[in-house]
């Protein structure tokens, strides 16, 4: 069973429960699959939980708002090829069940393989999905779930070649309220109303025009950072980030604070990194805009708080390690 299912998710369940539902002592307890996580390792993880809770507290999240959405504690439950009962999945009025499903058969003993079977291979979707994505599965689940197994490869091939949205980033433009910053993908921006004072192309192919008219007939300025997708683009971001603050502050005459849209191919990586850097540099702790770059000390704790702010508004934000390293290098050159 992957560590993500046996350890990471159970840890997050306890941390979230302690933060949001601290008055329920039973929800303090760590629950892990006993056949995977031994008693000793379980105790070692429990000893770290207080530190994890404090780390999340330091992010400054709106816990009251989160509790109003979640409403009740969460508990993990596991499904494996060896499962014989689904009693743990009966809906409860006391908690939400997080179902951790693994299709890999467990191999006992020290060896990771048995008769040619590679433990964990079943959870590596690239090995068997034939290009099927979660989005395509849920969109066509009725057809897929009723299909004969022998026909599945041909059906999947047809879906990935005919579905008009396959491979297209469907990230919507999201505004990081209460700031004037928004984040989106290049494809989603084509359908968005261009009511922005400035657009920063953080990665991918930029539009052919350098100016657009907003609904108020004011030109929308575009800054193209000329970063490619992937790790190379994330590394190139390090040298391109210094161009962004003067571009944004130059737009103060259009609106204070100026409305800025950050774009990249997916709306989840480079655009997140650039917006993150600007939130650290141009906004105070109350997210008030300051056209003068902040002279206050910027540290990794501040970066984590700003990133948590972004992911609260945009849960699918997923900046790569290389992107975050570039942000750290730009904001804290002496600490990187």
Image: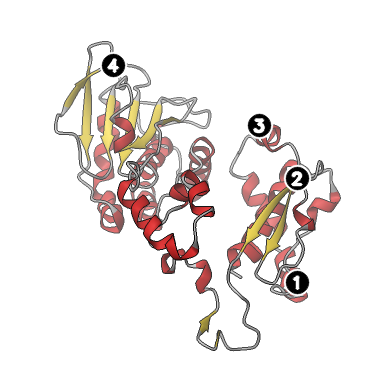
Q: How far apart are marks 4 and 1 (CA)?
A: 60 Å
Name the residue at 33% across, 48% down: 167
Residue that mark 1 sits on: 34
Tag 1 secondary structure: loop
Tag 4 secondary structure: loop
Can you give x and y, in whole percent of width and height, for residue 45 in the image?
Answer: 70, 66
- Of 184 and 77, the residue lying toward us: 77
User: Which of disc 2 and disc 4 is earlier in sequence?
Assistant: 2
Q: In which quarter of the image is residue 59?
A: top right
- Of 206 and 121, the residue lying toward us: 121
Mark 1, Cα crowd under 10 Å, few <14 / some 14-19 / many 20+, is few
Mark 2, Cα crowd under 10 Å, few <14 / some 14-19 / many 20+, is many
Image side of residue 208 versus residue 97, left or right: left
Answer whether labels 1 and 3 touch (C-beta < 8 Å).
no
Q: Distance between the residues labelled 1 and 3?
A: 34 Å
Q: Which of marks 4 and 1 is in front?
A: 1
Q: Which mark is residue 65?
A: 3
Residue that mark 2 sits on: 73
Can you give x and y, in whole percent of width and height, for residue 270 in the image?
Answer: 34, 46
Q: Which residue lies furthest to the top in this view?
A: 216
Q: Residue 254 carries which label?
A: 4
Q: Is residue 170 above or below residue 85?
A: above
- Of 295 and 149, the residue lying toward us: 149
Quarter containing the C terminus: bottom left
Tag 2 secondary structure: loop
Tag 3 secondary structure: helix
User: Which of disc 3 and disc 1 is earlier in sequence?
Assistant: 1
- Of 126 and 110, the residue lying toward us: 126
């Amino acid at each position: 069973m992957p560590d993500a299912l046996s350890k990471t998710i159970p840890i997050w369940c306890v941390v979230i429960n302690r933060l949001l539902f601290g008055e329920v002592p039973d929800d303090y307890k760590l629950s892990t699959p006993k056949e995977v996580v031994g008693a000793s390792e379980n105790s070692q993880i429990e000893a770290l939980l207080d530190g994890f809770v404090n780390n999340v507290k330091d992010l400054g999240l709106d816990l009251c708002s989160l509790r109003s959405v979640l409403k009740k504690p969460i508990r993990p439950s596991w499904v494996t090829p060896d499962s014989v009962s689904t009693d743990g999945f009966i809906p409860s009025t006391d908690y939400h069940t997080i179902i951790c499903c693994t299709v890999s058969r467990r191999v006992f003993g020290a060896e990771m393989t048995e008769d040619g079977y590679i433990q964990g291979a079943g959870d590596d979707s690239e090995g068997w999905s034939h290009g099927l994505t979660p989005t395509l599965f849920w969109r066509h689940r009725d057809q897929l779930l009723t299909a004969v197994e022998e026909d599945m490869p041909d059906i999947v091939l047809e879906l990935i070649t005919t579905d008009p949205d396959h491979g297209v980033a469907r990230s919507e433009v999201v505004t990081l309220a209460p700031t004037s910053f928004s984040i989106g993908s290049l494809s989603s921006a084509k359908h968005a109303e261009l009511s922005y004072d400035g657009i920063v192309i953080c990665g991918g192919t930029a539009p052919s025009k350098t100016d657009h008219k907003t609904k108020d007939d004011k030109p929308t300025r575009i800054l193209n950072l000329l970063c490619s997708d992937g790790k190379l683009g994330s590394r190139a971001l390090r040298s391109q980030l210094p161009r962004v603050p003067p571009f944004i502050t130059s737009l103060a005459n259009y609106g204070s604070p100026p409305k800025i849209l950050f774009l990249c191919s997916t709306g989840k990586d480079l655009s997140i990194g650039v917006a993150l850097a600007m939130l650290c540099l141009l906004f105070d702790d109350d997210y008030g805009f300051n056209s003068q770059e902040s002279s206050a000390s910027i540290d990794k704790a501040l970066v984590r708080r700003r990133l948590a702010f972004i992911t609260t508004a945009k849960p699918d934000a997923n900046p790569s390690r290389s992107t975050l390293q570039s942000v750290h290098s730009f904001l804290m050159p002496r600490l990187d």
